[in-house]
Amino acid sequence: GRTPPITALAAGSTTGSEVNLLLHDADKLDKSLRALTWGKKNAVMLSLDKFTCVRKGKTTERTARNSSPSSRLLSIMTCARGNESLDIEAPTMLDRDKFASAFARFLGVPLVEEGAGGKAT
């Protein structure tokens, strides 16, 4: 299946209005006041301080079951019980690498390469 789009919202927003978080200086706006949300029917919203790392490849139970090659998979890991990861399938390895780097930089978390033994890059 196709991964639903990821939208950035203000964590306390009740209107659902989108916020372009890339325009904000990460040092000026506390991570706990910003959030990512995904899904439609059962939307998940997590504050940015809940994300722990970005992993490339088949690193979660869900990605291990995915029939796509590991070179197209990435997982954004969290410390939120019940929503431990957001698993994404990219169209190509290059896209996966770009997505992974961008998410790691934006969230300010380590990027872990597949097979790196947990070593962040």
Image: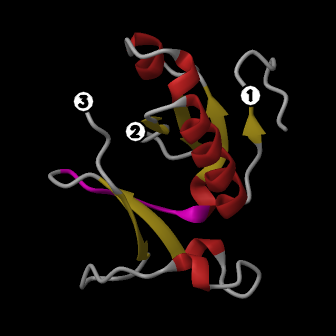
Q: Earlier in the sequence, mark 3 or mark 2?
A: 3
Q: Which residue is mark 3?
A: 1
- Asked whether disc 3 touches disc 2, contact meaning CB atoms under 8 Å apart, the reply is no
Mark 3 residue element: loop
Residue 58: image location, x then y, percent: 55, 18
Between circles 3 and 2, the one closer to the viewer is 3
Q: Which residue is mark 2?
A: 82
Type of colouring? secondary structure
Q: Quadrant of residue 66?
A: top left
> 47 or 16, which is in the foreground?
16
Dot 3 crowding, Cα within 10 Å, few <14, some 14–19, many 20+: few
Say what amino acid the circle numbered 2 marks: Gly
Residue 20: image location, x then y, percent: 48, 80
Mark 1 residue element: loop
Magenta region: 42-48
Q: Is residue 51 magenta?
A: no
Residue 113 has which mark? 1
Instruction: Establish if 105 lies above or below 70.
Output: below
Residue 18: image location, x then y, percent: 35, 79
What's the CA distance linking mark 2 and mark 1? 24 Å
**Residue visible at 72% across and 58% down?**
105
Q: Earlier in the sequence, mark 3 or mark 1?
A: 3
Mark 2 residue element: loop
What's the CA distance linking mark 3 and mark 1? 24 Å
